[in-house]
């Protein structure tokens, strides 16, 4: 008897579950169309999906940092080229005590001369790189001072752990090559994988920088042939910008409108409000019976509504260009 009762209860539970599943999948109801998530609930849901999909902080993406020191702006320009080409983060190595023109005057016994002649000189840096551990590759730029990298570059390299990272140096100079300047830096980050550096003259073009980066197999993630790298970011919700990145590369606003059970007047007003606030996602269907109102050009309704439709259509046409 107990066994028979248990079987009956089990069958009843299965029937209930099936009925719930049909109710949830059987189209959009008016209750569902008005259901909204709070920002915290949406963020929690999105973060969970990002984690499940493996797109959140993907380990397959190569994270690049352009770090540079520039006393006169020459190296800065090339570093900015590299950052733009690679779509990489950029960090300027700024001295705590800025250099003056007198400090930089060659062979006058000024500050720069003294530092370059002092093997223990380590000028202080203002600020630091946040989360250095997240970067896989460092493109390091600096000018040549007396045939060597400025001692503030030594300070930079001694301030972080570069174990396992790739460092690609470049320098700017009037005539001196990168030569020993890069070699003498190797011991300061001995556990890094140092690539051969390059010297650029003042005024080097963006094309020169791009060619050099390509030769060293560095390119922007968006241009990568790696499917995982190329798709990184797609489908991730940016809750600050309130957009989601589509496969096409376009950003779509997260905000949308479900039009189920919206009557004619309410539908027109709702669509107008959505468009004015930046929304572009409108859910509709033939069975809703309000496509004219959604499109803003229908013939239903009284004169007041038709006038509103015409105004809405002109507004929408302007938004669409």
Image (tube, rainbow, N blue to C red):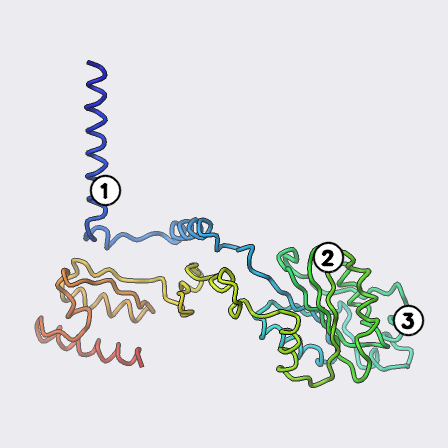
Residue 142 occupies quadrant: bottom right
Q: Is residue 15 above or below residue 30?
A: above
Disc 3 designates what residue? 117
Disc 2 designates what residue? 160
Marks 2 and 1, how far apart at CA: 55 Å
Q: In the picture provided, is 64 more to the left or to the right than 192?
A: left
Marks 3 and 2, how far apart at CA: 24 Å
Q: In the picture provided, is 50 more to the left or to the right than 134?
A: left
Taking depth in this image into account, of 288 and 230 the one nearest to the observer is 230
Q: Residues within 10 Å of mark 1 (few under 14, many from 20)?
A: few
Residue 264 occupies quadrant: bottom left
Give the number of the disc on residue 254: none
Q: Describe the element under mark 1 as helix, strand or loop.
A: helix
Disc 1 designates what residue? 21
Q: Earlier in the sequence, mark 2 or mark 1?
A: 1
Q: In the picture provided, is 130 more to the left or to the right than 111?
A: left
């Amino acid at each position: 008897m107990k066994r028979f009762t248990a079987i009956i209860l089990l069958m009843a539970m299965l029937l209930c579950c099936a009925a719930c599943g049909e109710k949830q999948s059987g189209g959009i109801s008016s209750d569902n169309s008005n259901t909204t998530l709070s920002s915290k609930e949406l963020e929690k849901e999105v973060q969970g999906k990002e984690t499940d999909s493996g797109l959140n902080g993907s380990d397959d993406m190569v994270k690049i940092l352009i770090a540079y020191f520039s006393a006169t702006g020459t190296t800065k320009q090339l570093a900015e080229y590299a950052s733009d080409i690679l779509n990489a983060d950029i960090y300027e190595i700024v001295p705590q005590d800025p250099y003056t023109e007198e400090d930089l005057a060659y062979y006058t016994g000024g500050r720069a001369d003294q530092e370059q002649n002092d093997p223990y000189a380590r000028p202080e840096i203002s600020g630091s790189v946040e989360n250095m551990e997240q970067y896989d590759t460092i493109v390091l730029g600096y000018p040549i001072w007396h045939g060597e990298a400025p001692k503030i570059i030594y300070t930079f390299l001694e301030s972080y752990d570069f174990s396992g990272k790739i460092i690609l140096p470049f320098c700017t100079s009037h005539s001196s090559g990168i030569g020993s300047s890069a070699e003498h830096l190797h011991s300061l980050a001995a556990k890094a994988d140092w690539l051969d550096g390059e010297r650029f003259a003042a005024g080097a073009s963006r094309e020169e920088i791009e060619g050099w980066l390509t030769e060293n197999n560095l390119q922007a993630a968006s241009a990568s042939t790696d499917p995982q790298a190329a798709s990184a970011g797609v489908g991730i919700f940016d809750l600050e910008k309130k957009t989601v990145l589509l496969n096409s590369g376009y950003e779509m606003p997260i905000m949308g409108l479900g039009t189920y059970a919206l009557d004619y007047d309410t539908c027109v007003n709702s669509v107008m409000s959505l468009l004015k606030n930046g929304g572009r996602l409108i859910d509709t269907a033939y069975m809703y019976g309000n496509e004219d109102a959604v499109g803003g050009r229908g013939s239903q309704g009284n004169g007041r509504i038709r006038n509103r439709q015409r105004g809405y259509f002109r507004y929408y046409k302007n938004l669409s260009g």
